[in-house]
Image (cartoon, helix red, strand yellow):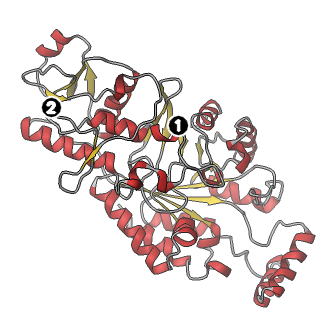
Amino acid sequence: MADIHYHIERPGPRSRYIIAHLLGPMAGWHAVEIPDREAFRSMEGPKLLYGEQREEDAFQVKPHGLLGQTAISPLDPEIAWPQDLPLLFPSEGGDLPFDLFSAAFFQLARYEEYGTISRDEHGRPLSTALHAARHGYLQQPIVDQWFRLFVDVWRRRHPQLPAVRRKYAQTATMDVDNGAMYLGRAWWRSVGGGVRDLLRGHPRRVLDRMAVLGGSRPDPYAVHMAFLDLVERNHGRAIINFITAPRGRHDHAVGHDQPFMRAIVMAVAARAEVGLHPGYASSDTPSRIPEEKQQLEAVTGKPVTLSRQHFLRMQLPGTLRELERSGIREEHSMGLADRTGFRAGTCTAFPFYDLQREEPTSLLIHPFAVMDSALCYRMRLSPQEAVAEAVRMVDAVRAVQGTFISVWHERFLSDYGDQAGWGNVADQVISYARP
């Protein structure tokens, strides 16, 4: 039996996609579209109308027009600020003061990223160019907040509205950009690294390198099992992503032909989820992705269905199309490289919508809110400041019963070298984020 019935006055792929997502996965309701207006009128219980012509006993959201379009045009949505919640596509005459579904679609479909948005040296959209940053709501899971407003207003009108069935959760992820700091390098790289450490005034690191290579101490980046222990203690979902791309300017991971590296991957796969970390060039040449995925599967011995792009580099829609074709079911690149926040305006996983083809896909996008390298390198925070900033993001996600996803790297987890002092940041954040 359906919890909710809804009718779309002028249905299309955009409106069907976003309404099904908000009423289904986001709410946890069994929602059924009723295409026939007369049949819709006869339905009992909570009803939603997306259209211009009011129905007496239905909750009405008036359309802006974006969801009826089939083109990608330059768009800078109008915004209103009643109280502390910014509303995109404000409107009058409905039961909400804005078109919730156009606003949510603009965010989740990443409409603005298909245009001529400013990008950084790696081809990533500049966070400062995003509508959310320019209007001051990038730090809010705004789609989830709009959804809560929608439910609250609807429940005042219809007290029998079902309870929202969702709960707060945590996912902690690690991207293995290196695999090891000292192990697995060609002899000439080890010698060159030692000389560089001496010239930079780090003789202790030369001794550490010798001890690691001699087998008397573990590599500083051997943090994978400790990370899994931390996440498991705090009842989170753990994912570790590995690079299999050949070595290049931006891809530095130890190759999986190294026995110790294969052992790490297999040990992780035995107790947690393993994801692919497609190499830097995969964004420009998506055809590399299937081969890189197959190489990782050859080590794990099982299908790999999770992924996050190295450097968060992805082209919309090409990279995501290739990932889906390759058998990836969850994509975890939707976040910011230079600050905390909600790039897609949400802390709830959502299906990728291909704007060029005007169709939803089965690829689930899992957005993250915090990444260690952004806290340190781009925001230039101290470890203590980084914890406070991450805690603020956890609180924002917890308030809407979303999923807090964080991204960590070996160099910060190691508490070693240039990242000394950062080793406890993940511990504090993941512990605080415990469900």
Vertical comparison of 194 with 159: above or below = below
* Residue 56 spot, x, y in % from top left: 6, 22
The answer to whether residue 384 is left or right of residue 2 is: right
Residue at the disc numbered 1 = 114
| Residue drawn at the location 7% of the way across and 36% of the way down | 157
Q: What amino acid is found at the position of numbered circle 1 in the picture?
A: Tyr
Q: Is residue 417 visible?
A: yes
Inspect this view and state whether residue 434 appears: no
Residue 247 in percent (x, y) is at 81, 55
Q: CA distance from mark 2 to mark 1?
A: 30 Å
What's under tag 2, amino acid-wise? Gly
Q: Which quadrant holds the N terminus?
A: top left
- Disc 1 residue crowd, few under 14, some 14–19, many 20+, Cα 10 Å: some
Pointer 2 residue: 94
- Quarter placement of the C terminus: bottom left
Determine the secondary structure under disc 1.
helix
90 to the left or right of 130: left
Front in this rendered view, residue 176 or 237: 176
**Figure check: 61 above or below 179:** above
Q: Residue at x 27, y 37 (%)?
A: 100
**Which badge, 2 or 1, comes first in the chain's sequence?**
2
Q: As rendered, which of 110 and 398 lies closer to the eye?
A: 110
